[in-house]
Image (cartoon, rainbow, N blue to C red):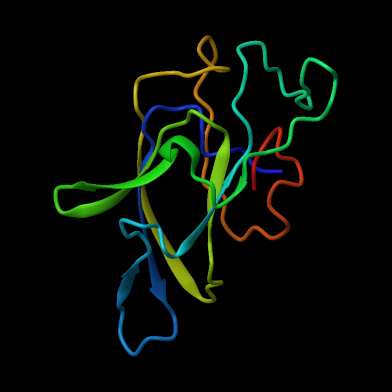
Amino acid sequence: MTKPLVNLTVLSLLVTVLSGFTKGPEWKNLLDKNLSQWEIYLSFRHKKDYKGQIPVNDKGELIQPIGLNNNMDHVFTVIDEKGVPVLRVSGEIYGCIFNKVEYLNYHLKAKVKWGSKKLVPRTDKLKDSGILYHSIGKQGDEYWRSGC
């Protein structure tokens, strides 16, 4: 499974794709203010003592994920940085975004910048995040760990 795009105050990510089907090298920016080219998946809000276990409530019942396209607390937003749209990930809830469209024969270009604040459950641990591409499968299969 994947590492979630979480546990950081700001993960700034500029994502563009160079399509192999254009006549010339035309870059397509995949970010807009409404994240209209993306699906959003959120897992659940972690508790301080989270150690990767399957989340349950006080009765021992499985906690359901927040789910698909419910961007609770605006975990994923697009901000403008010097005229360039940038993906901001708050890290408050484990989750991921993934393209609505599949791309073939492309080049991915991304820039990443970490924030300084750490959030539960990683306040005393290293920051943990990543970019996964060429992934397939249903989102949330292992939502307590990865989201996508």
Residue drawn at (48%, 19%) of the image: 119
Residue 14 percent location from the top left of the image: 33, 52
Name the spot of residue 115 as percent of width and height, x first.
34, 27
In which quadrant will I find the N terminus? top right
The x, y position of residue 35, in whole percent, is 40, 57
Q: Residue 148: where, in percent of width, then height? A: 64, 48
- Depth order, front residue of 34/132: 34
Q: In the drawing, does residue 76 fall left or right of residue 3?
A: left
Looking at the image, the residue that sits furthest to the front is: 59
Q: Farthest residue toward the left?
A: 82
Give the farthest residue toward the right: 60
Residue 24 to residue 56: above or below? below
At 49% across and 24% down in the image, what residue appears? 127
- Residue 61 horizontal side relative to residue 36, left or right: right
Direction from residue 74 to residue 65 in the image, left or right: right
Write the residue at 50% across / 27% down: 7
Given residues 64 and 89, the one toward you in this image is 64
